[in-house]
Image (tube, grey):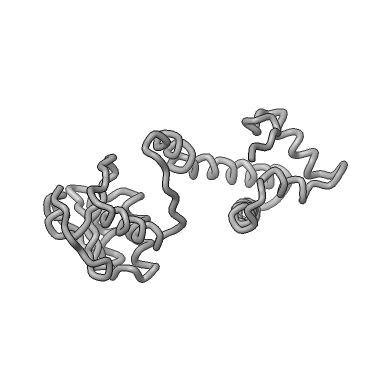
Amino acid sequence: METLSISAESFKVGFIGAGKMAESIARGVVASGMLFPNRNSTAVHSNLNRRQVFESFGVNVFSSSEEVSGSSSLYLSLDNEPWTTEEDGALVAKLFGSVGKMFKAYEKMFDAVTGLSGSGPAYIFLAIEALADGGVAAGLPRELSLGLASQTVLGGATMVSKTGKHPGVLKDDVTSPGGTTIAGVHELEKGSWSCNNGEQNG
C-alpha cells in the first residue's frame, strides 16, 4: 500500500467491509464530530439492508472495495495489516480515540485481546441476560428486570474504569457480612464464575 502524506484535519476514511464493526466505528467518528458523514465510505456488494444502514447517517456507499480505497486517504481493513508509518499509526489512534478508549498491545497479544475484548461483549450480554432472567424468576416484569440488569453492569464497569480499583476490592466494598450479596457471590463461585477461585491479581 502506498503511503500518503495526509492531514489529520482533512482525511477521508474508507472501511473495507460493511459489517457491524465498521458501522459502529463510522457512527462513533461521526457522532464525535471528528469527521463529517460524507468523509466516510464503505462498499456494499449485494446486501441492500447494509447499504441503507450506512446511507441513513450519510456515509458514502460504493459497489466495490477498490472504489473505497481509491477515494480514501486512509482505509481500514479487519485484516492484520501493519501500519506503514508512524503517521499512519497516529491517524488511526486519533480515529479510534474519538470513538472510545484506545489501548496499545504487542502483536503477540492480539489473540488474547481478541478473546477478551473482541469476543467479550457477547459474554457481557450473556451476563446481562442471566441477571435479567434472575429478576424475572424473582417476580420482576421483564422490561424492568432488563433495565436494572443493564444499568447495574454499566454502573459496575464505570466504577472499575473511573476509580482504578481492583474489581475484587469494589466487590468487597459492597458486600456486607452475612448479607444477600455475599450469599449470591458464594453461589456464583460454586458455579465456577471466578476463573481464579477468588484470588486477586494485581
Q: Farthest residue in the right direction?
A: 178
Front-lying residue, 87 or 91: 87
Q: Farthest residue in the front direction?
A: 86
Point 24% across, 51% down: residue:
85
Task: For the C terminus, give its image quadrant.
Answer: top right
Point 23% across, 69% down: residue:
10
Q: Residue 110: percent from the left, percent from the top?
A: 40, 37
| Side of 177 where 48 appears, left or right | left
Q: Is residue 164 visible?
A: yes
The relative height of residue 80 versus residue 191 in the rendered view (above or below) is: below
Point 37% across, 55% down: residue:
24
Front-lying residue, 28 or 89: 89
Q: Residue 4: percent from the left, percent from the top?
A: 16, 58
| Side of 165 where 93 appears, left or right | left
| Side of 120 where 89 appears, left or right | left
Q: Residue 53: percent from the left, percent from the top?
A: 30, 58
Point 79% across, 41% down: residue:
182
Q: Is residue 49 visible?
A: no
